[in-house]
Amino acid sequence: MNEPTSTLPADRLLNAYEEVAYVGRANRMSHPDRMATIATLLGMNPAPPSSCRVLEVACGDGGNLVPMAASLPGSRFVGFDFAPTGIERAKRMVEELGLANAEFLALDLREFPERLGQFDYIIAHGFHSWVPPDVRASLMPMVERHLAPNGIAFISYNTYPGCYVRRALWEILRYHTRDVADHRAKLVAARSMIALLAEPATTHSEIDALLRSELQQMGKLTDSALAHDDLSVPNDPVYFHEFVAELERSHLMFVAEAELHTMVGLGITPRVRQALGSMERLTREQYLDFVHFRRFRQSLVCHAGALSQFAVDPARAKPMHVSASAGTLAQARDGKADDPAGEPLLRALKALLVRIWPRSIPMAELAAALASQVPGGAANPLPEIGIRNAVMQTYGTGHAELYLHPPTVAAAASERPAAFGPARWQAANSAAAITNVYHEVTELNHPALRPLLTGLDGTRTREQILAEPGTIFAGPNGPALLRRALDEFVRLALLVA
């Protein structure tokens, strides 16, 4: 039923991306600051995110790389992709934003030029599982050649055993659309089949219910995601141990997951934790995939021997900044308070991070900021090591984020509000997803927010914005509406200081 991926001609792969454009999205897990932060915690000394060289493999239309370049003007960024249409859009975005630190090339990974030299950070997101074997075989050798000695690479890929469930659905859709040549018509046919199979029914087994749930989630995907992820040929998941073997053949090694908290075994029983605790670290990662039925990984890798310790050193977080995570902010918005019987310092820390959002706070300032929030803290100085351990526990459970080079974000809208450049460009060009200062993706659903965001270039006062005819801000309720809109932009971390 499925054509061997190694025989797929290049023009068919290219046509798939030309007929249904791949719409790039920011992936905060691939940001160089995130890679540098995790590597630093593990004892490495990576290049400063503020002055580094970054390469993205299969960069698409620059939706991930351009916002990085805008937020790190002292660094250099290179992106390349096989599909020229996306590259042209990326070049247009860079030109219209006036960025001088990013370049985009249309080329094949197998012909990557040696003249481009080495990079401190290499990103390969949405590539490893979705290319023919001969192309994938070129990835790790290229990383080995072009990654700086203390560099970090980010590689995402589909994994087994979790993808066996989705593979069943992929094969159903491929069979249903087997005779449809046009990629847009294939999307229509696939969505029709998804809707049909996802209809609620009296389930006779847990497997039936699981598949229907998967189909319902699949039906919510964008055309770009459905065409180039789920309907993609090829789409070849691997087991983690196979990925590690691939790294080792190119003298590379696994560092950690970009979502570090996924490595601590949250939510598993004490008996399972005990069994996993006796395993070697790479074996433990494979068994965690078995336990969690993991389907997708976002792994950080480095040169073999560049990492010598495999445990986080809390002392290395001392120069970092900390902010609330998206999950913690969502819990706060939903009114889900922490366990009142929990550790007072942890509760106070999370409450502080939510209160100061969208700002981050230096580790060095936490003691003073928390002193009045913890019982007895004002009278007895909080120990530095206790605060540091609380931060690491909060970070380790995914409730906080750490930064070596925190972004510049506005804590309140100024008299001349200025929005993050890539967010303004995306709003003006009808992008579905808007990238904020923290390299997170958000959506603007109110029709008045997009044109307002587009015009926030820092040159106009609030009074001038209110005076513009033909907007909802021109009426008597304009000042209140504008204030609420700007407050929403602040909450979404879309404004820069």
Image: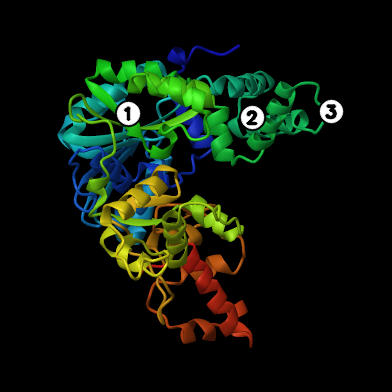
In what quadrant of the picture does the N terminus appear? top right
Mark 2 or 3, nearer chain start? 2
Q: Amino acid at mark 2?
A: Lys
Identify the mark at residue 108; answer none if there is no mark: 1
Q: Nearer the viewer, mark 2 or mark 3?
A: 3
Side (left or right) of 311 relative to 357: left
Question: Label 3 belongs to which residue?
Answer: 202
> Marks 3 and 1: in contact by CB < 8 Å?
no
> Marks 2 and 1: in contact by CB < 8 Å?
no
SS at circle 2: helix
Residue 356: % across, % down: 42, 67
- Is residue 470 shown to the viewer in this render? no
Identify the mark at residue 119; answer none if there is no mark: none
SS at circle 3: loop
Question: Label 2 belongs to which residue?
Answer: 186
Q: Amino acid at mark 1?
A: Asp
Q: CA distance from mark 1 to mark 2?
A: 26 Å
Residue 385: % across, % down: 27, 52
Residue 219: % across, % down: 67, 37
Examine the rendered structure and indicate whether residue 44 appears above or below residue 174.
below
